[in-house]
Amino acid sequence: MTRRWLILISLLGHLTLAFGLFVAGVWHIEQMPAGKHVTAALATMSPPAASGGAPLAARKVDVVKKPVRELVQPTVKPDLAPTPAVPTTTSLEPGEGSGSGAGSGSGDDPTGTGGCTSPPCGVGEPVAAVAALPPPKPPAPPKPTFVPPVILEGLRISGETQIHPPEGVANQILRDNRTRVTGGFRVCLSAGGEVASVTMALSTKYPAYDSLLADTIRTWRYKPYLVDNRPTAVCGNVTFIFAMH
């Protein structure tokens, strides 16, 4: 078998296969049920013309148009009711009338007696008694300046400083097996240097000894404490230590 026969047999086989496929396609197209109609709601544009030829015919498509309801905005009618005018009446004619009334008043009398409080008063008008105002309070004295114990000791010019406890208190201290007793006082001086007050700050635990120390401090004398060359009241602490050997 030559090559030419092989080509001829292959060509016939292909033609037969193509014809069979064509026939089968026509059979399926004819078997489609009749009466069905496809409706498209989209419009199609005609395809552009081929180069060098006439434009292709557009495929006919059924277009279903739906009615469009227009939206109408309601119109608001303005209120055209007229505003009633306010009548005005002007009368220039003279008229006649009569009336009566009564009144009352009040004055500047703080006591309620009805008299005058600011002379000179009218004829026959009594002068009201004005309540006396309380006298103003005197200004509070300035607080004394607080100084260290060394400065207060330097201001002292007289007074006993070696103050021993009374005999009965000393015996009590021995019975208590105490060898050291401490007491403290706050001493305030006037501007002239006199002892103005003595206040106990630390008790010795023996009232008789505390009283003796306070009474002795009140007999001390000091020179004035100067601030800008002016005598000034001051306060300071004084401490007593009694030790037994």
Image (cartoon, helix red, strand yellow):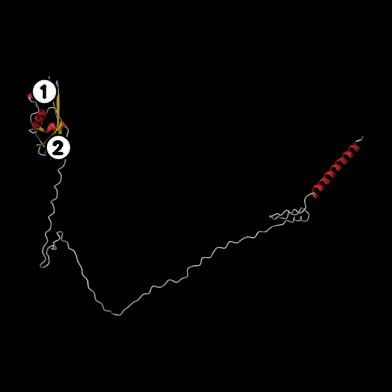
Q: Residue at x 8, y 24 (%)?
A: 168
**SS of the residue at dot 2?**
strand
Image quadrant containing the N terminus = top right
In the rendered image, the vertical position of residue 66 relative to residue 5, given as above or below: below
Q: Residue at x 89, y 39 (%)?
A: 9
Instruction: Indicate which disc residue 172 carries.
Output: 1
Q: CA distance from mark 2 to mark 1?
A: 36 Å
Which is more N-terminal, label 1 or label 2?
1
Residue occupying the point 84% across, 46% down: 23
Specify the label residue 223 is tagged with: none
Q: Identify the image quadrant of residue 92.
A: bottom left
Task: Give x and y (percent) for residue 87.
Answer: 38, 74
Task: State which mark lies toward you, 2 or 1.
Answer: 1
Residue 50, horizontal then vertical, whole percent: 76, 53
- Is residue 50 left or right of 198 when viewed as pictured? right
Residue 245 vs residue 148, the one in the foreground: 245
* Amino acid type for the residue under numbered disc 1: Gln
Mark 2 lies on residue: 234
Tell me the crowding category of disc 1: few under 14, some 14 to 19, or many 20 or more residues within 10 angstroms, Cα based.
few
As helix, strand or loop, the secondary structure at mark 1 comes to helix
* Category of crowding for the residue at label 2, using alpha-carbon neighbours closer than 10 angstroms: few (below 14), some (14–19), many (at least 20): many
Q: Amino acid type of disc 2? A: Val
Residue 199 placement: quadrant: top left
Q: Position of residue 117 (x, y in %)?
A: 13, 61
